[in-house]
Amino acid sequence: MFARNLSRLGILAAAMLASTAALAQVSDDLVKIGVLTDMNGPASTPTGQGSVTAAQMAVDDFGGKVLGKPISIIYGDHQLKPDIGGGIARRWYDVDQVDLIVDVPVSAVGLAVQNIANEKKKLFIAHSTGTADFHGKYCSPYAMQWVFDTRALAVGTAQAVVKRGGDSWFFITDDYAFGHSLERDASSVVTANGGKVLGSVRPPLATPDLSSFVLQAQASKAKIIGIAAGPPNNMNEIKTGAEFGVFKGGQQMAALLALITDIHSLGLPAAQGLLLTTSFYWDMDDKTREWSKRYFAKMNRMPTMWQAGVYSSVMHYLKAIEETGTDEPLKVAAKMREKPIEDFFSRNGKLREDNLMVHDLWLVQVKKPEESKYPWDYYTILAKIPGDEAFGPVDPACAMAKK
């Protein structure tokens, strides 16, 4: 009798183990995350190796395994070219069995990778892709936008500047998808708040000489020269504007996208007084400082919002796999939307039905040199911008959100 009961217990235990194993499924017995970024070009400092490091920090902090299976990080350089980025993404999904792609600076490359993710039914989290179309007309159940979009930056910066009296604008806009989207969203905010847009010029990405574009903006007599650009054009335009006496002439520059590494490169004497909106600042509180100092020990510079966002999203992704017992993309994405996102990067965060991660942003002003007390002490926080206000409602163009 005892032997029969013991046998039954053994069979029951085996069945329970088999059931657990069936529930906990990881494809290829490995969770592989690909950081697709710019390793050597103009976006390499705010993304690049720093994004790879942030992803690896998340894996290490998680313990290196999920559901008993190892987690692997690989990286690739898309050279800011959509065809190269799309080709790497296709190979990673098809051949290398990558489960998740992260980072991807430049909106044109991000949109190309999004198309591949849709086709292959694999996950993609964008951090340095900013076009609002990503979660609007191109929204996808497989692609998430984690750190920012152009509308959020426009609301944060343009609305605040107009309220401070900067009611006439002229834009210097990067001539690609991201810049166009940024100008469009900022212009709508300016006009909605009673301001006027006097015109714009559109230099190509990484234009070596921006003098003629800055001179046209200066000649417009607009109170505000809006920099609808990312690196490297954004800081080169601010530097050129300072050299040409834009600030001394009474005009102000407002950066619709500026990163802490941009300010570090430009220097406080040239950047002082600049208004900008950010999703993250390393010196905001104890939580941001603790993580950022660990990052600094590895990279010898403070993280950008994009790099901090990579860590946040990878950690949230791994937790979702653990809780769902599988790395099946749509089940993991559903769990990621279900749980709030409250960490050193995100305040009041939630992944919305259109796969946009909505969270609080911060309006900051670059300090004067004499106000900075220690290295990387660059920002004065002026205001918190609630996530729902910054990112706005779900875009009705998103078919996924209508279901």
Image (tube, grey):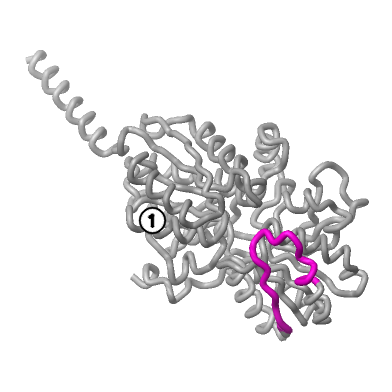
Mark 1 surroundings within 10 Å by alpha-carbon count, few (fewer than 14), some (14 through 19), many (20 or more): many
SS assignment at label 1 = helix
Compared across the picture, whether 223 is left or right of 390 comes to right
Asked if the stretch drawn in magenta spans residue 207, the answer is yes
Q: Residue at x 54, y 40 (%)?
A: 55
Q: Is residue 375 visible?
A: yes
The front one of 322 and 198 is: 198
Q: What residue is shown with label 1?
A: 116
Q: Position of residue 375 (x, y in %)?
A: 82, 42
In the depicted structure, whether residue 370 falls above or below residue 255: above
Q: Quadrant of the C terminus?
A: bottom left
In the depicted structure, whether residue 154 falls above or below residue 374: below
Q: Residue at x 40, y 34 (%)?
A: 66
Q: Position of residue 329 (x, y in %)?
A: 35, 50
Q: Residue at x 56, y 35 (%)?
A: 57
In the depicted structure, whether residue 396 falls above or below residue 24: below
Q: Quadrant of the N terminus?
A: top left
The front one of 206 and 118 is: 206
Question: Which residues lie in the magenta part?
Answer: 197-214
Q: Quadrant of residue 226?
A: bottom right
Q: Quadrant of residue 254?
A: bottom right
Q: Position of residue 281 (x, y in %)?
A: 70, 51
Residue type, numbered disc 1: Ile
Q: Quadrant of residue 189?
A: bottom right
